[in-house]
Image (cartoon, rainbow, N blue to C red):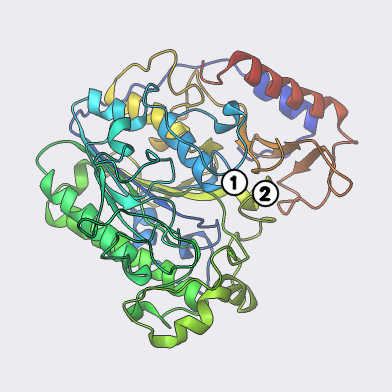
Amino acid sequence: MSIKKRAIPFIAAILMSPPTMLVAAEVDSKLNVIIILADDMGYGDLSCYGATLINTPNIDRLASQGKRFTDAHAAASVCSPSRYGLLTGSAPWRLGKKGNGYRLDPEKLSLASFFKSQGYQSAAIGKWHLGYSSDWNIPIVKGPLENGFDYHFGVPQNHNDETRCFIENRDIVGREPGVPYRIVKGKDFPEGLAEPRQEDQVDTVLTGKAIEFIRKNAEQPFFLYFTPCTPHTHVTPAAKFRGTSKAGLLGDQIQELDSHVGEILDTLDELKIADKTLVIFASDNGGSYKDFKGTAGTKLNLASEEGGILEKYESAKEDAKKMGHSTNGIYRDGKGHPEEGGHRIPFIVRWPGKVTPDTTSDYTLCLTDIFATAAEILGADLPEDAAEDSISLLPWMLEKEKSPQIRRFIFVQGDTLDDAIAICTGRWKMIAGKGSKEVEAVQLYDLNEDPAETKNLAKENPELVQQFLTELEKARANGRTRP
């Protein structure tokens, strides 16, 4: 919501707005749902969001055939807690956990468990990053299937993780018979793994598995949670995409992802199920301007070394910046930070016949909202103890922007070290944290006037700051933001 008024009248208005009648969804129990969640893709990485050195015609096609949201936010500014928020509808900061190693609790209703209860077949294909059981030499490796999914094929954390393997359902792909699987320091590949992943083929393999799942389940309702690894470092596009963009390897890999999205959309068209499939495209957090150094020196397992990839992959994101590409557009900082660049993300929905093509919305949303949206579309009630921070997007998707559950604030986990929370309302944004010598504990920004968050207005607006802090305390005390 973009309105240019003084701070106090604005906040009073949104707090006092009377509830209106909920839009009744036209329930289609046979609607397929596909979520495509990119990895570390920034707001400025797509041509439909302003990128000029990268061309993404297939993702742009989704936007032209659907709705593009301009004020969407991840549940956290890093991967694992953000994915936790999407799949549970609950804010990850409620767990009080530091770091990037979140796990799903099989006892808590997940989005996959919800779809299963509605008669859906579901698959988690791609990056998981929400934990498996610890001993991978026990025949059953517990993970997505224990959290409601019927099929899983993916990588444990990223295509650069030390496991160097795929997991299919409950086991490692390519085990060496009779040899225990072990990650050994100093060795390029784990013992007991006869077929290590090829870094430049990971998303190609994952896309193939996603298409197999769609074909297999075309005659029944399905939920596909497809999570490619692009553009997380290392940046290792397949050979045929190298040199195709004007933003170096980073742009090349984003264009590869766009091609894979096109393959999925073409499959829906071929099977004649596009008109009964809701497709959501988003990212798990903002982009990073720096290349991840934790695996520097890793021996890459590549299908092809063409295009000088071994000389370029460790500096791909820094190179793209030097070439003039801004991964997070006009927004400040990036992955791992509470500023907008860390959590403002691309978010596109396509639902033929329901969502008006080539439209945009500046409604402030969070990835946690996908859960309640799915429930309203299917006409299903959510249990009281599930999806505590999920509010349906359906009225805004259908341009019937009336709902008694209109969101006043969203609360984003800002980083992995501090307890900083980014509080977003559209125009006004506050960051509440512990603070330090370099960073003030409370920061307030008018994003209409200062989208790059350069001028802290907290001291000039103490009443507004107090209202934000009161809402944060209320969200903590209530254990939920969903009415």
Q: Position of residue 400 (x, y in %)?
A: 42, 30
Specify the farthest residue to the bottom.
307
**Which residue is located at x 26 percent, y 39 percent?**
140
Dot 1 alpha-carbon crowd within 10 angstroms: few under 14, some 14 to 19, many 20 or more:
many
Which residue does the numbered mark 2 point to in the structure image?
337
Residue placed furthest toward the left? 219
Tag 1, which secondary structure? loop
Question: Callout 2: 10 Å neighbours few (<14), some, many (20+)?
Answer: many
Q: Is residue 75 left or right of residue 164?
A: right
Q: CA gap, disc 2 to disc 1?
A: 6 Å
* Amino acid type of the residue tagged 1 in the rendering: Ser
User: Residue 405, position in %: x, y?
Assistant: 50, 20
Residue at 40% over, 70% down: 255
Q: Earlier in the sequence, mark 2 or mark 1?
A: 1
Whether residue 249 is visible: yes
- How many numbered circles are shown? 2
Residue 371: x %, y % from top left: 40, 30
Q: Is residue 21 above or below residue 185?
A: above
SS state under label 2: loop
**Label 2 with label 1: CB-CB less than 8 Å:** yes
Residue type at mark 2 is His
Query: Residue 77 — which label?
Result: 1
> Is the residue 174 above or below the residue 283 in the image?
below
Residue under the point 63% across and 20% down: 475
Quarter location, residue 426: top right
Q: Nearer the viewer, residue 16 or 114?
A: 114
Q: Is residue 156 left or right of residue 209?
A: right
